[in-house]
Image (tube, rainbow, N blue to C red):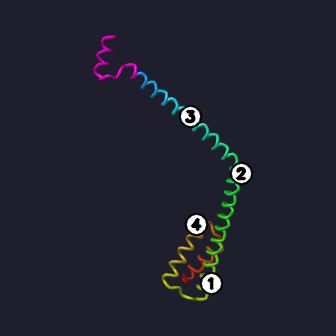
Amino acid sequence: MTQSLLVLSAQIEGITVGQILIVLTVLGSIWAGVSKVRKAFESFKRTINGWVVDELKPEFVSIKDRLDALEARNERQDMDNVKNYLVLFLADLERNEKPDEVELLRFEEQFKYYTDKGGNSYIRRKYKKLKDEGKL
């Protein structure tokens, strides 16, 4: 074994086995140090993330609740606007005003949207009545 180490030592051109061991020890120490720093950073990150989530969670819930309320309000306003359009369009038909092709297509889009969203039945009844009378 000693003989093979001597041959190895001679092949590396003047670098001794001791020097190689020192380099490997230094590299191992650096690797261990980097690993410890990385683990410490991960632990710190988890701690900070937990603190931030705990501290800000009530704020996030409050913001989400407000956004949900705004979304519901917007949905109600949208349905009210569609309902107003449909009522006016159907009233025009009752007065024998003839819509052009584009107005009729737009009415059909709005009526489908309104019924898909569960709109009131009185508009559906008025639609059916005017359709039966041939005005639609």
Q: Which residue is mark 2?
A: 58
In the rendered structure, the answer to whether residue 45 lies left or right of residue 1 reads right
Task: Name the foreground residue: 34 vs 110.
Answer: 34
Q: Is residue 136 magenta?
A: no
Q: Residue 52's x, y, as percent?
A: 66, 47
Q: Residue at x 49, y 81 (%)?
A: 102
User: Which numbered disc flags the more N-terminal residue, 3 or 1?
Assistant: 3
Using the numbered discs, state the Cα–Cα distance from disc 3 to disc 2 in whole angstroms.
30 Å
Residue 35's tag is: none
Residue 91's tag is: 1
**Which of the 4 image quadrants contains residue 82?**
bottom right
User: Which numbered disc flags the more N-terminal residue, 3 or 2?
Assistant: 3
**Which of the 4 image quadrants contains residue 2?**
top left
Give above or below for 90 relative to 50.
Answer: below
Q: Which residues are magenta?
A: 1-20
- Secondary element type, mark 3: helix
Q: Which residue is mark 3?
A: 39
Q: Residue 105's x, y, as percent?
A: 50, 78
In the rendered structure, the answer to whether residue 30 lies left or right of residue 128 reads left
Bin the neighbour count of mark 1 within 10 Å (Cα to Cα): few under 14, some 14-19, many 20 and up. Answer: some
